[in-house]
Image (cartoon, grey):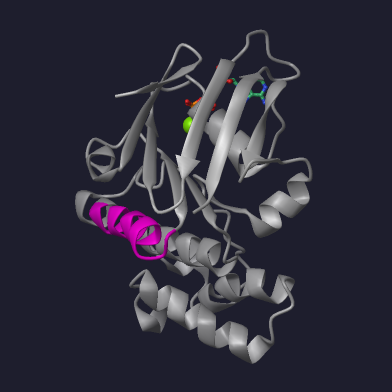
Amino acid sequence: MSKLELKGVSFKYPRGKRMIFQNVSETFESGKLTTIEGESGVGKSTLLALLSGLALPTKGGLFMDGEPVRDLTEYRRNIAATVAQGNHLFEGRTVLENVMYPMLLKGEDPAAAKKKAAEYLSDVKLDEELLTHFPSECSGGEQKRVAFARAMALNNPVILADEPTANLDKGTSRAVADILCSLAHDHGKLVIVVTHDMFLPERADVRLYLRGGVLEHE
Ligand SMILES: Nc1ncnc2c1ncn2[C@@H]1O[C@H](COP(=O)(O)OP(=O)(O)O)[C@@H](O)[C@H]1O
Ligand SMILES: [Mg+2]
Protein backbone atom coordinates (compact mmCIF):
# COMPACT_ATOMS: atom_id res chain seq x y z
CA MET A 1 0.00 0.00 0.00
CA SER A 2 1.29 3.47 -0.89
CA LYS A 3 0.73 6.68 0.99
CA LEU A 4 1.23 10.29 0.04
CA GLU A 5 1.64 12.79 2.85
CA LEU A 6 1.56 16.53 3.27
CA LYS A 7 3.49 17.44 6.41
CA GLY A 8 3.13 20.93 7.86
CA VAL A 9 2.63 22.48 4.45
CA SER A 10 2.27 26.23 4.11
CA PHE A 11 2.20 27.97 0.77
CA LYS A 12 2.38 31.50 -0.56
CA TYR A 13 2.79 32.44 -4.22
CA PRO A 14 6.00 34.40 -4.86
CA ARG A 15 3.94 37.40 -5.95
CA GLY A 16 1.03 36.64 -3.62
CA LYS A 17 0.24 38.63 -0.49
CA ARG A 18 -1.27 35.94 1.70
CA MET A 19 -0.46 32.43 2.85
CA ILE A 20 -2.90 30.18 1.00
CA PHE A 21 -2.29 27.26 3.39
CA GLN A 22 -1.16 27.22 6.97
CA ASN A 23 0.49 24.11 8.34
CA VAL A 24 -1.60 21.54 6.41
CA SER A 25 -0.96 17.88 7.21
CA GLU A 26 -2.86 15.03 5.58
CA THR A 27 -2.25 11.42 4.54
CA PHE A 28 -3.72 9.97 1.34
CA GLU A 29 -3.82 6.21 0.72
CA SER A 30 -3.75 3.99 -2.34
CA GLY A 31 -7.00 2.25 -3.27
CA LYS A 32 -8.99 5.24 -2.06
CA LEU A 33 -10.78 8.06 -3.81
CA THR A 34 -10.41 11.33 -1.88
CA THR A 35 -12.34 14.45 -2.84
CA ILE A 36 -11.36 17.97 -1.81
CA GLU A 37 -14.17 20.52 -1.81
CA GLY A 38 -14.09 24.22 -1.11
CA GLU A 39 -15.29 27.58 -2.31
CA SER A 40 -13.89 29.24 -5.39
CA GLY A 41 -10.53 30.91 -4.76
CA VAL A 42 -9.88 29.02 -1.51
CA GLY A 43 -6.79 27.30 -2.97
CA LYS A 44 -7.98 23.94 -4.33
CA SER A 45 -6.05 24.18 -7.60
CA THR A 46 -2.99 25.38 -5.71
CA LEU A 47 -3.18 22.37 -3.40
CA LEU A 48 -3.51 20.06 -6.39
CA ALA A 49 -0.49 21.75 -8.02
CA LEU A 50 1.56 20.96 -4.89
CA LEU A 51 0.34 17.34 -4.90
CA SER A 52 1.10 17.16 -8.65
CA GLY A 53 4.71 18.24 -8.17
CA LEU A 54 4.22 21.47 -10.09
CA ALA A 55 5.29 23.66 -7.17
CA LEU A 56 7.17 23.25 -3.89
CA PRO A 57 5.65 24.20 -0.52
CA THR A 58 6.90 27.42 1.04
CA LYS A 59 7.17 25.48 4.31
CA GLY A 60 6.81 21.77 5.10
CA GLY A 61 6.99 18.97 2.58
CA LEU A 62 5.45 16.24 0.46
CA PHE A 63 6.34 12.63 1.24
CA MET A 64 5.76 9.47 -0.81
CA ASP A 65 5.91 6.26 1.23
CA GLY A 66 7.81 8.15 3.93
CA GLU A 67 10.44 9.58 1.56
CA PRO A 68 10.59 13.34 0.97
CA VAL A 69 9.80 14.35 -2.60
CA ARG A 70 12.75 16.43 -3.81
CA ASP A 71 13.03 15.80 -7.54
CA LEU A 72 9.77 17.12 -8.99
CA THR A 73 10.58 16.00 -12.57
CA GLU A 74 11.10 12.43 -11.38
CA TYR A 75 7.94 12.70 -9.22
CA ARG A 76 5.82 13.82 -12.19
CA ARG A 77 7.24 11.09 -14.40
CA ASN A 78 7.04 8.14 -12.01
CA ILE A 79 4.70 8.95 -9.11
CA ALA A 80 1.92 11.41 -9.95
CA ALA A 81 -0.22 11.75 -13.07
CA THR A 82 -2.43 14.82 -13.30
CA VAL A 83 -5.57 15.53 -15.29
CA ALA A 84 -5.66 19.31 -15.53
CA GLN A 85 -8.90 21.26 -15.59
CA GLY A 86 -8.34 22.12 -19.26
CA ASN A 87 -7.14 18.57 -20.14
CA HIS A 88 -4.03 19.87 -21.98
CA LEU A 89 -4.33 17.34 -24.80
CA PHE A 90 -1.95 17.70 -27.76
CA GLU A 91 -4.00 19.17 -30.58
CA GLY A 92 -1.69 18.03 -33.41
CA ARG A 93 -1.97 14.37 -32.34
CA THR A 94 -4.85 11.94 -32.63
CA VAL A 95 -6.61 10.57 -29.56
CA LEU A 96 -4.61 7.32 -29.82
CA GLU A 97 -1.32 9.23 -30.23
CA ASN A 98 -2.14 11.38 -27.18
CA VAL A 99 -2.46 8.27 -25.03
CA MET A 100 0.60 6.58 -26.58
CA TYR A 101 2.74 9.64 -25.79
CA PRO A 102 3.61 8.97 -22.10
CA MET A 103 4.50 5.37 -22.91
CA LEU A 104 6.81 6.38 -25.79
CA LEU A 105 8.38 8.93 -23.43
CA LYS A 106 9.16 6.08 -21.03
CA GLY A 107 10.79 4.05 -23.85
CA GLU A 108 7.94 1.62 -24.58
CA ASP A 109 8.03 -0.13 -27.97
CA PRO A 110 5.58 1.73 -30.32
CA ALA A 111 3.54 -1.36 -31.24
CA ALA A 112 3.07 -2.28 -27.57
CA ALA A 113 2.24 1.35 -26.70
CA LYS A 114 -0.41 1.43 -29.43
CA LYS A 115 -2.05 -1.74 -28.15
CA LYS A 116 -2.02 -0.52 -24.52
CA ALA A 117 -3.32 2.93 -25.52
CA ALA A 118 -6.33 1.29 -27.19
CA GLU A 119 -6.90 -0.72 -23.99
CA TYR A 120 -6.77 2.37 -21.74
CA LEU A 121 -9.23 4.13 -24.06
CA SER A 122 -11.49 1.12 -23.89
CA ASP A 123 -11.21 1.17 -20.05
CA VAL A 124 -12.60 4.72 -20.03
CA LYS A 125 -15.28 3.61 -22.52
CA LEU A 126 -14.31 5.90 -25.35
CA ASP A 127 -16.01 5.09 -28.63
CA GLU A 128 -13.49 3.17 -30.80
CA GLU A 129 -14.16 5.23 -33.89
CA LEU A 130 -12.73 8.31 -32.11
CA LEU A 131 -9.22 6.83 -31.83
CA THR A 132 -8.08 8.47 -35.08
CA HIS A 133 -9.84 11.78 -34.33
CA PHE A 134 -8.10 14.92 -33.06
CA PRO A 135 -9.08 16.27 -29.61
CA SER A 136 -10.90 19.24 -31.18
CA GLU A 137 -13.17 16.74 -32.92
CA CYS A 138 -14.26 15.29 -29.56
CA SER A 139 -16.88 16.58 -27.10
CA GLY A 140 -15.87 17.88 -23.65
CA GLY A 141 -16.77 14.56 -22.04
CA GLU A 142 -14.85 12.59 -24.66
CA GLN A 143 -11.81 14.82 -24.19
CA LYS A 144 -12.01 14.21 -20.44
CA ARG A 145 -12.00 10.42 -21.04
CA VAL A 146 -8.92 10.80 -23.28
CA ALA A 147 -7.19 12.89 -20.59
CA PHE A 148 -7.82 10.11 -18.02
CA ALA A 149 -6.61 7.42 -20.44
CA ARG A 150 -3.42 9.43 -21.01
CA ALA A 151 -2.92 9.82 -17.24
CA MET A 152 -3.38 6.05 -16.84
CA ALA A 153 -0.79 5.45 -19.58
CA LEU A 154 1.91 6.91 -17.33
CA ASN A 155 1.21 3.91 -15.09
CA ASN A 156 1.92 6.02 -11.98
CA PRO A 157 0.50 5.11 -8.55
CA VAL A 158 -1.06 8.54 -7.91
CA ILE A 159 -3.77 10.11 -10.07
CA LEU A 160 -4.91 13.69 -9.49
CA ALA A 161 -7.69 15.60 -11.18
CA ASP A 162 -8.79 19.24 -10.95
CA GLU A 163 -12.57 19.73 -11.29
CA PRO A 164 -12.94 16.80 -13.74
CA THR A 165 -16.73 17.16 -13.99
CA ALA A 166 -16.86 20.94 -14.44
CA ASN A 167 -18.90 21.85 -17.54
CA LEU A 168 -20.11 18.28 -18.05
CA ASP A 169 -23.74 17.19 -18.04
CA LYS A 170 -25.07 14.92 -15.30
CA GLY A 171 -24.73 11.64 -17.24
CA THR A 172 -21.18 12.39 -18.35
CA SER A 173 -20.25 13.50 -14.81
CA ARG A 174 -21.49 10.14 -13.56
CA ALA A 175 -19.29 8.39 -16.16
CA VAL A 176 -16.26 10.37 -14.97
CA ALA A 177 -17.11 9.43 -11.35
CA ASP A 178 -17.20 5.77 -12.46
CA ILE A 179 -13.70 6.16 -13.97
CA LEU A 180 -12.38 7.73 -10.73
CA CYS A 181 -13.90 4.97 -8.55
CA SER A 182 -12.54 2.28 -10.87
CA LEU A 183 -9.04 3.78 -10.76
CA ALA A 184 -9.06 3.64 -6.96
CA HIS A 185 -11.00 0.44 -6.34
CA ASP A 186 -10.11 -1.80 -9.33
CA HIS A 187 -6.64 -0.48 -10.19
CA GLY A 188 -5.53 0.35 -6.61
CA LYS A 189 -4.52 3.91 -7.48
CA LEU A 190 -4.28 6.73 -4.98
CA VAL A 191 -6.84 9.15 -6.40
CA ILE A 192 -7.31 12.76 -5.27
CA VAL A 193 -9.92 14.97 -6.91
CA VAL A 194 -10.67 18.62 -6.40
CA THR A 195 -14.33 19.32 -7.08
CA HIS A 196 -17.37 21.43 -6.40
CA ASP A 197 -19.61 18.79 -7.96
CA MET A 198 -22.65 17.98 -5.80
CA PHE A 199 -22.60 14.25 -6.49
CA LEU A 200 -18.95 13.21 -6.91
CA PRO A 201 -18.04 13.53 -3.17
CA GLU A 202 -20.83 11.07 -2.32
CA ARG A 203 -18.82 8.41 -4.15
CA ALA A 204 -15.58 9.23 -2.29
CA ASP A 205 -13.94 7.10 0.40
CA VAL A 206 -12.54 10.22 2.06
CA ARG A 207 -14.17 13.63 1.84
CA LEU A 208 -12.14 16.73 2.69
CA TYR A 209 -12.93 20.45 2.77
CA LEU A 210 -10.49 23.29 2.27
CA ARG A 211 -11.56 26.25 4.43
CA GLY A 212 -9.53 29.25 5.51
CA GLY A 213 -6.22 27.62 4.56
CA VAL A 214 -6.94 24.42 6.49
CA LEU A 215 -8.03 20.92 5.34
CA GLU A 216 -10.93 19.53 7.34
CA HIS A 217 -12.50 16.07 7.41
CA GLU A 218 -16.25 15.90 7.09
N1 LIG B 1 0.32 32.52 -9.77
C1 LIG B 1 -0.32 33.12 -8.77
N2 LIG B 1 0.22 34.16 -8.10
C2 LIG B 1 -0.42 34.75 -7.07
N3 LIG B 1 -1.63 34.35 -6.60
C3 LIG B 1 -2.23 33.33 -7.22
C4 LIG B 1 -1.63 32.65 -8.33
N4 LIG B 1 -2.47 31.65 -8.74
C5 LIG B 1 -3.53 31.72 -7.94
N5 LIG B 1 -3.41 32.72 -7.02
C6 LIG B 1 -4.36 33.06 -5.93
O1 LIG B 1 -4.41 31.97 -5.03
C7 LIG B 1 -5.73 31.81 -4.50
C8 LIG B 1 -6.19 30.37 -4.69
O2 LIG B 1 -6.36 30.09 -6.08
P1 LIG B 1 -6.80 28.65 -6.61
O3 LIG B 1 -5.88 27.64 -6.02
O4 LIG B 1 -6.84 28.73 -8.09
O5 LIG B 1 -8.27 28.51 -5.98
P2 LIG B 1 -9.45 27.48 -6.33
O6 LIG B 1 -8.91 26.41 -7.24
O7 LIG B 1 -9.90 26.96 -5.00
O8 LIG B 1 -10.53 28.28 -6.97
C9 LIG B 1 -6.60 32.84 -5.20
O9 LIG B 1 -6.75 33.92 -4.33
C10 LIG B 1 -5.78 33.22 -6.44
O10 LIG B 1 -6.04 34.53 -6.82
MG1 LIG C 1 -9.46 25.80 -9.15
Q: Residue at x 37, y 47 (%)?
A: 33
Q: Residue at x 38, y 64 (%)?
A: 142
Nearer to me, 45 or 107? 107
Give the image quarter of residue 120: bottom left
**In the rendered image, which quarter contains the C terminus?**
top left
* Quarter holding ligand 1: top right
Q: Residue at x 41, y 63 (%)?
A: 145
- In the rendered image, the vertical position of residue 110 relative to residue 91, given as above or below: below
Q: Is residue 110 left or right of residue 28?
A: right
- In reply to whether residue 183 is colored magenta, the answer given is yes
Extreme top residue here?
A: 17
Count of numbered badges drawn on the protein = 0
Per the rendered image, the range of residues in magenta is: 174-188
Q: Main secondary structure of the magenta part?
A: helix
Would residue 44 be visible to someone looking at this image?
yes
- In reply to whether residue 136 is colored magenta, the answer given is no
Extreme bottom residue here?
A: 111
Nearer to me, 154 or 147? 154
Residue 182 x %, y %: 33, 61
Residue 103 x %, y %: 65, 74
Would residue 131 be visible to someone looking at this image?
no
- In the rendered image, the vertical position of residue 69 relative to residue 121, given as above or below: above
